[in-house]
Image: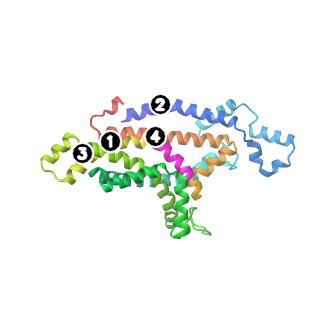
């Protein structure tokens, strides 16, 4: 396990280098002017000399390769730079927002995996039954629905029509403290929407995996030995049927991050979504590079986690050969 982790970490270095270089290259080609975004409305009345001086002070008049190298060497030393749009250190901006994005994604992912497993197993027990058709139809319908559409529908139903949950934010309006109760009530809608957006994939994969496992000879043999249906399902079919789901965990990380950005925007959740949007539109090189590197590292970590889980659960897979 340690050998696989070390090898993957070594492979991640050139990937992260290419990603950060690409971020600076794309940002340099962007039509947005970072100087005008930094100056705001003051840029409308400023003369060209003032704008050029500000451009020089921000360092955006230099080639993007030089800016990328300066950012990279500083980042390796622990300094992620100063965000021009937030007017604060990048590490401080990410540190404040990352905890809320992590909370949102973790809760949504856990709900999607648990609920998807339950629904998939129920559907796989009796293929072609009314419950199976209902579960698969719901999964395919949710798979086709855009996450922002689900979010807006949830706001309309639960916040506006039923008035049982807050429409957005982290705390109640006018509150000067962040309490666990307020965070929990405000987390239900965005986490629920994000979980629903990931639910179809886990449900369909579990249904297919458990359905195939129930038709295998070892499961048939367990039934022939007189084992209870519960023991056959949970002790044999479920373990074998969940193996394909483990590979899905890593592949769903990019989709989870993308969905989280949209959900955070709709529900005004104080995560990294707002920072990402502002960094992109303002061509905030340090913040944009740090956020992109963080997202790439999350994807690589998700793939590594899927491989480790697969190797631990399936005895046929040897981690030292992966």
Residue on which disc 2 sits = 10
First in residue order: circle 1 vs circle 3: 3
- Residues in magenta, as a range: 252-262
Give the percent coordinates (x, y) of residue 247. Answer: 38, 40
Residue at mark 1 to residue at mark 4: CA–CA distance: 18 Å
Residue at mark 2 to residue at mark 1: CA–CA distance: 26 Å
Of discs 2 and 1, which sits in the foreground?
A: 1
* Residue nearer the viewer, 71 or 147: 147
Give the percent coordinates (x, y) of residue 19. Answer: 57, 34
Residue on which disc 1 sits = 243
Disc 3 crowd, CA 10 A, few/some/many (<14, 14-19, 20+) = many
Residue on which disc 4 sits = 301
Q: What element carries label 3?
A: helix
First in residue order: circle 2 vs circle 4: 2
The answer to whether residue 260 is magenta is yes
Say left or right for 258 vs 84.
left
Residue at mark 2 to residue at mark 4: CA–CA distance: 12 Å
Name the residue located 46 percent from the left edge and 49 percent from the top edge.
143
């Amino acid at each position: 396990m340690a050998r696989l982790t070390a090898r993957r970490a070594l492979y991640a270095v050139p990937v992260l280098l290419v990603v950060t270089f690409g971020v600076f290259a794309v940002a340099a080609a962007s039509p947005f002017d970072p100087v005008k975004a930094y100056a705001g409305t003051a840029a409308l009345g400023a003369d060209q000399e003032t704008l050029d001086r500000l451009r020089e002070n921000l360092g955006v008049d230099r080639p993007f390769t030089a800016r990328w190298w300066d950012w990279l060497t500083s980042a390796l030393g622990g300094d992620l730079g100063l965000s021009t749009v937030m007017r604060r250190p990048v590490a401080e901006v990410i540190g404040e927002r990352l905890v809320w994005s992590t909370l949102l994604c973790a809760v949504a992912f856990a709900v999607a995996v648990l609920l998807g497993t339950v629904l998939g197993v129920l559907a796989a027990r009796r293929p072609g039954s009314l419950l199976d058709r209902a579960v698969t139809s719901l999964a395919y319908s949710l798979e086709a629905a855009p996450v922002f559409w689900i979010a807006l529908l949830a706001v309309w139903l639960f916040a506006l029509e039923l008035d049982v949950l807050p429409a957005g934010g982290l705390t109640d309006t006018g509150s000067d403290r962040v309490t666990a109760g307020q965070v929990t009530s405000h987390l239900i809608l965005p986490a629920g929407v994000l979980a629903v957006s990931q639910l179809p994939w886990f449900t369909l994969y579990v249904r297919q995996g458990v359905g195939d496992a129930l038709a295998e000879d070892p499961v048939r043999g367990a039934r022939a030995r007189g084992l209870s249906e519960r023991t056959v399902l949970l002790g044999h079919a479920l373990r074998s049927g969940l193996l394909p789901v483990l590979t899905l965990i890593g592949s769903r990380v990019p989709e989870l991050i993308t969905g989280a950005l949209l959900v955070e925007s709709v529900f005004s959740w104080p995560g990294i979504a707002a920072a990402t949007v502002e960094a992109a539109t303002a061509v905030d090189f340090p913040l944009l590079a740090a956020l992109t590197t963080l997202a790439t590292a999350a994807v690589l970590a998700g793939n590594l986690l899927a491989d480790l889980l697969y190797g631990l659960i399936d005895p046929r897979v040897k981690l030292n050969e992966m």
